[in-house]
Every structure is written in C-alpha cells, then in structure tokens.
Image: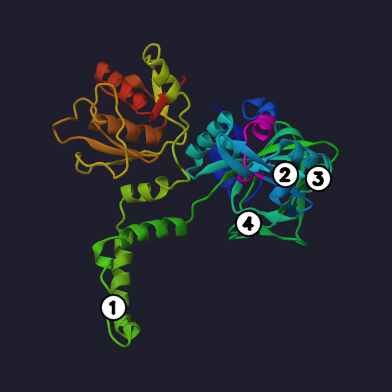
Amino acid sequence: MVGLAALVGDVEQFFTRHLGKRPLLRGGAIADVRAIASLDDIDRVITGSGLRAPGVRVVKDGTVLPQDRYTSPSTLGYAGLTDVVDPAKVTRLFRGGATIVLGTVDLLLPRLHELCKNVEMDVGHPVDANVYIAPPGANAFQVHCDAQDILVIQVYGGKRWTLFDHIVPNPGGGRMLPGLDAPSTVYDLRAGDVLYVPRGMPHLVRTDTSSSVHVTLSINTLTWADLLTDLTARILRSDAYSRPLPMGRDVARQAEPLLKQYADELAARLADSDAAALHRAIYSRPAFAEGHRTGLLRDALLDTPPPGRPDRITLRPGTWPIIANPDATTERPGATPSAAPGAASGVTPGARGRGEAVRIEVGGRAFQVAPEVADACRRLLDGGPLPVEALSADTAAGARIAEVLLALGLCTTSPH
C-alpha cells in the first residue's frame, strides 16, 4: 500500500528537516507510476466520464481560458447541461500549447484516492490531488506559490521545476510573484520521481521537448484560525451567548463594560476544550469526509462474509472516528445508525439494555457500539494495525470485535 513513506522516505526525517522548510527530491521513488494513475486512467476521465467544467481548467501562458472554449452543450439523462467538457476541444487546445488541469481528480481515480487517504492518515490534514497534463514547451503559470504543501509525482515525460529560496509566510489562497529576485534551484523530474515543495515556496514549472503528466498531492493544512473559529462557533451556539444586547439610545456604550466579561468567559471555555471537542472540530469538517471504502457495496451485493477470519485489522485510510460517551439512547440528528451483525441500530452485542453503549461518529454517520469495540477503535486510531488476537484476552471476543468494526466500514483487513 503506497503511503507517505513511499513518497518521502523516512517520515520523521521529512517532518523535522523538510516539512514547511525546504524541498525534497526523491528520484525513482515510485517504481510503477501506473499503480497511482495511468495514462489510460487520465484519458478516461477526460474523454469518457462526462466531466463538467468545474473539474477542469485549461491554462495557457499564465491565463486560465474561459470554459466555453472547451465545453459544449450536452444531455446527460434528461438534464440539458452547458458545461460538459468536450474531449475534442480540450485535445485541440492541448495540441495548441495549453495545459489541462484536473482538479480533485482523486475522487474519480480509486488508486489515487486511496493514496490521498493513506497520506492523510500520516499528516493528519485533508489531502486531495490534481493532475496536470502539459504539452512540450508549456509554461502554464508564472512564478507563484501555493497555500498548500505539495507532493509532486511525475507520471509521464519530464518537467522542470525552478524553486526559489524564499518562503512566503502566509500565502493564503496562493500568490503570483512575477519578477521575484531570489536564489533558485532547478529540479528536472522524470517518471517515478517525487518532489516535495513547501507551502509558500515560489516556483516556476515548465516542460521542455516532451509532454508531461504529473500528479500533485495537496496537503490542505488546517490552521489555528480554522480550529479556533470552529470551536468558538460551537461555544457561541449555547444559550449564554444568545442573550440580547442592552437596549437604549447608545447600545455600544452600554455593551462596552460587559464585553470583557463575555470575552473572558469565552476564552476560558475555549481553553477548557477537551480532546473530544478538538477531535470533532478537526475531523468532522467536510474536507475529511469518509475514508476510502471501496468494496462495501460489492460485499453487500454478494451478501457473503469474507473468506475466513482476518488476522489483522486497521482503520480504513482516511477514517477518523470521533468516540464519545454520551447517553447511549441519543443519535445525532440526520444521522443513520449503521447495523452490525447481531446488532440493533448499530449497538453491538453486549451493549444493549445496559446503558453502556459508546457513541462513534464518522463521515456524517453516528452509531453506538459496545465499550470493548470503542476501545479497540481508539487503539487503532492511536497505533495503527492490530492483530485480531490482541483485541481481547478472549479469542472469540476479539473475532467478534473485528467483525463489528469491519461490518460498520470503520476497518479493513491489514496485510502482515
């Protein structure tokens, strides 16, 4: 299974020496790039998936072309659409020197999606992928920096990256930096090479005599502003902050002496946020969605259990369960409980009727499990794959715990 270590080598060394500081080039890191995305995969997305314009940009000489240059009216089912990508137009623009950019294409390519989720588990921030298809002699964008740390995987042909020895501290949504005067280093990438570019590091990318396809994994770093905004919004929904401001001719003057009181109270509540609140604020955001869950529908259609009992299980890549202990009879509004073998409404055997169920939320779903199942889930979240025999002192109980976690879609089997 390809993950962060396959891309950067020693993960701890990458975190301490490179992340956010300096680039890293690993020549030939990926022996078979087709395991991530093949040319046939990419062609199929553009020419055979009914892709719509928000998923594609076409760029030439620093200018994003208007979408009517590469879309045509089309009918999908009974819907008349005006923004469906026209493969012939896109190809013609590519032959004329334009670069094709496929945004968040990991959602359409299962192996690439799995890679994003594997990397996400290591970095703890949302990860998605773009694909850049460039003709010879292309220079799609001028010198710019990105708001994300990026991992570039060269899939086909070659690409020349010029990285400037400069970090923009808060690049926000990215920034164009024409005329930047700073020392630079050139990296020539070939198929299988991986290049890490820190967030905020200016770069210029171009092709030479060959076409190029590369995948960019974007680590969409969550900031302290993101976390504090989310936590604050949750606190402000309490009744204490829904009281009206004073009334009268000068509301501001009357509110001024009360402001510090409310602000101090809010700061104290923020500082007292527990681990569950932090986990929910970070991992319940839509960017994380759910883990890579390929195979769930197939298993339901076949209605057959997996052959034999697994030896080891692990959380599905990109799965960040939120484990809490509220009243076991409550469900989150709008969430559908998931059923497990032998379970009622997602409550596993041994948890029903005793008020001992533990609540788990993940990817918009909420259900309740027995405490020993929740404990196993916590251990998997903290430490990676576990042998089934290590889930419980009772071998049969360990097998049942694994069965429940697999059936709920939280876990998958893990190779030795």
Which one is earlier in the sequence, the residue at label 1 or at label 3?
Answer: 3
Q: Earlier in the sequence, mark 2 or mark 4?
A: 2
Distance Cα–Cα, label 2 vs label 3: 18 Å
Question: Disc 4 marks which residue?
Answer: 174
Who's the residue at 38% across and 11% down the image?
Answer: 308
- Colouring: rainbow
Q: Which quadrant holds the N terminus?
A: top right
Residue 239's spot in the image, x, y percent? Answer: 24, 63
Q: Which element carries disc 2, helix, strand or loop? A: loop
SS assignment for the magenta stretch, majority: helix
Dot placed on the residue nearer the N-terminal end, 1 or 2: 2
Count neighbours of disc 3 (C-alpha within 10 A) and say few if under 14, some if 14 to 19, many if 20 or more. many
Residue position marked by numbered label 3 in the rendering: 138
Q: CA distance from mark 1 to mark 2?
A: 58 Å
Q: Is residue 376 above or below residue 264?
A: above
Q: Name which of mark 3 and mark 4 comes first in the sequence.
A: 3
Residue contact between numbered discs 1 and 3, judged by CB atoms under 8 Å? no
Q: Earlier in the sequence, mark 4 or mark 1?
A: 4
Q: Which mark is residue 258?
A: 1
Query: Quick one: SS at disc 1?
Result: helix
Which amino acid type corresponds to the residue marked 4 in the rendered image? Answer: Gly
Q: Amino acid at mark 2?
A: Tyr
Q: Give the spatial CA distance, label 2 vs label 4.
A: 25 Å
Which region of the structure is painted magenta? 42-56
Image position of 131 with respect to 392: above or below: below
Residue 30 shows up from this direction: no
- Could you tell me how far apart the alpha carbons at marks 1 and 3 are, in whole angstroms? 60 Å
Kindly identify the amino acid type of the residue bearing the numbered disc 1: Leu
Percent of width and height locating residue 254: 29, 84
Q: Which mark is residue 89?
A: none
